[in-house]
Amino acid sequence: MRHWMAIAALALAGLAHAEDLPTFKITIKDGTISPARLEAPAGKRFKLEITNAGKSPAEFESISLRKEKVLGPGVTSFVVVNPTSPAEHVYFDDFHPQAKGVLVIK
């Protein structure tokens, strides 16, 4: 029982820590992604808050960042990006591959 309580406490601490991170917002809506270009700082952890404002499911994905998140209509969630060197990372809606954006880390 104590083991599960410790795991739950660590999970809550991780969520609280994620809330303190700089946050950048991405909106997916029925085959479009906004913004198409997003800039974030290199060498720092940050959060991408993703909202599906559309009427169908969406899947945020970035192969180079190794991040993906499936979102139902009207759902908002997030992914945490660990510190990385300057680079450009394409992100897209895997259900609508034409919907793309680029995350520029500098």
Image (cartoon, rainbow, N blue to C red):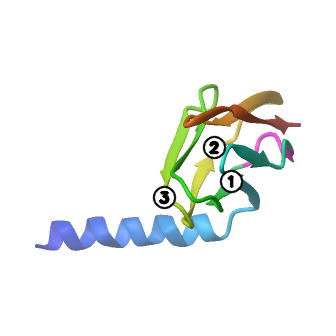
In this rendered view, identify the residue nearer to me: 31 or 80.
Answer: 31
Locate residue 98: give its quadrant: top right
Is residue 2 positioned above or below 83 on the image?
Answer: below
Q: Residue at x 75, y 46 (%)?
A: 33
- Contact? badges 3 and 2 (CB < 8 Å): no
Q: Residue at x 72, y 56 (%)?
A: 27
Q: CA distance from mark 1 to mark 2?
A: 26 Å
Residue 37 is left or right of residue 33, and the answer is right
User: What amino acid is at disc 1?
Assistant: Lys
For the magenta stretch, what is the residue range?
38-44
Q: CA distance from mark 3 to mark 2?
A: 25 Å
What is the quadrant of the N terminus in the image? bottom left
Picture disc at residue 82: 2
- Label 3: state its secondary structure: loop
Near mark 2 (Cα within 10 A), the count class, few <14, some 14-19 or many ≥20, is: few
- Contact? badges 3 and 1 (CB < 8 Å): no
Q: Where does label 3 land, which residue?
A: 72
- Label 1: state its secondary structure: strand
Q: Where does label 1 land, which residue?
A: 29
Work out which residue is located at the far left of the displayed protein and give it.
Answer: 1
Q: Position of residue 62 (x, y in %)?
A: 62, 33
- Contact? badges 1 and 2 (CB < 8 Å): no
Residue 28 is left or right of residue 88, and the answer is left
Q: Earlier in the sequence, mark 3 or mark 1?
A: 1
Q: Earlier in the sequence, mark 3 or mark 2?
A: 3
Residue 37 is left or right of residue 80, and the answer is right
User: What amino acid is at disc 3?
Assistant: Gly
Q: Position of residue 35 (x, y in %)?
A: 83, 49
Is residue 46 positioned above or below 84 on the image?
Answer: below
In this rendered view, identify the residue nearer to me: 41 or 66.
Answer: 66
- Label 2: state its secondary structure: loop
Q: Residue at x 28, y 64 (%)?
A: 7
